[in-house]
């Protein structure tokens, strides 16, 4: 069975084909991703035997919500103790959080009172400081 994945992940265009994936592996992958996958369409193995090429199987992913992004950011800030907005954005983006969810998460952090924020010397960036340190 082959799986064709197209779309964007963290702002990067993706055009990927996975070959040799059996139906059980696909189910295991989907289960491990949990809420990261909104829908998975598969074609039965019987119909694959009748075709010369595997069908394209669209996989639609949803971006994580801003609340989950806020929780990830807060946990990362608590581990780091202090982090710049640029580094925090890079961390969240590398973990598949959409730009919109990152912006909302940073806004929620600033307004929520769970972290202290200050402007860096240049005034261009915020520094997020953990209150638990």
Image (cartoon, rainbow, N blue to C red):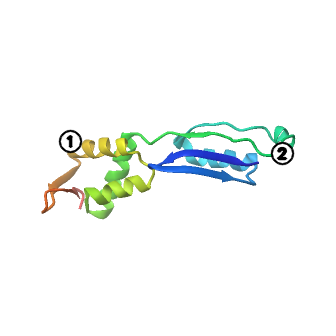
Q: Is residue 60 placed above or below 14 in the rendered structure?
A: above
Q: Secondary structure at mark 2?
A: loop
Q: Nearer the viewer, residue 91 or 19?
A: 19
Q: Nearer the viewer, residue 49 or 109?
A: 49
Quadrant of the image occupied by residue 122: bottom left
Quadrant of the image occupied by residue 121: bottom left
In the rendered view, does 65 fall on the left or right side of 120? right
Residue at x-position 46% and y-position 41%: 63
Residue at x-position 38% and y-position 53%: 92
Residue at x-position 26% and y-position 63%: 81
State which tag comes first along the sequence, 2 or 1: 2
Q: Nearer the viewer, residue 98 or 53?
A: 53
Real-space CA distance between mark 2 and mark 1, rounded to the nearest whole angstrom:
56 Å
What residue sits right under mark 1 in the picture? 111
- Residue 124, numbered label: none
Image coordinates for residue 4, horizontal then vertical, percent: 66, 46
In the rendered view, does 104 fall on the left or right side of 62? left
Image coordinates for residue 16, horizontal then vertical, percent: 62, 52
Q: Secondary structure at mark 1?
A: helix
Dot 1 crowding, Cα within 10 Å, few <14, some 14–19, many 20+: few
Label 2 or label 1, whichever lies nearer to me, is 2
- Residue 52, numbered label: 2
């Amino acid at each position: 069975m082959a799986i064709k994945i197209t779309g964007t992940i963290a702002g990067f265009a993706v055009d990927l084909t996975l070959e040799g994936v059996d139906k059980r592996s696909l189910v295991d992958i989907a289960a491990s991703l949990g809420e990261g996958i909104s829908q998975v369409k598969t074609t039965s193995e019987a119909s694959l035997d009748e075709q010369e090429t595997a069908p394209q199987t669209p996989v639609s992913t949803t971006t994580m919500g801003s609340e989950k992004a806020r929780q990830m950011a807060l946990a990362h800030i608590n581990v780091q103790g202090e982090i710049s907005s640029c580094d925090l954005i890079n961390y969240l983006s590398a973990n598949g959080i959409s730009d919109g969810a990152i912006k909302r998460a940073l806004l929620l952090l600033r307004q929520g009172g769970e972290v202290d924020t200050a402007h860096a010397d240049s005034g261009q960036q915020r520094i997020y400081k953990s209150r638990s340190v």
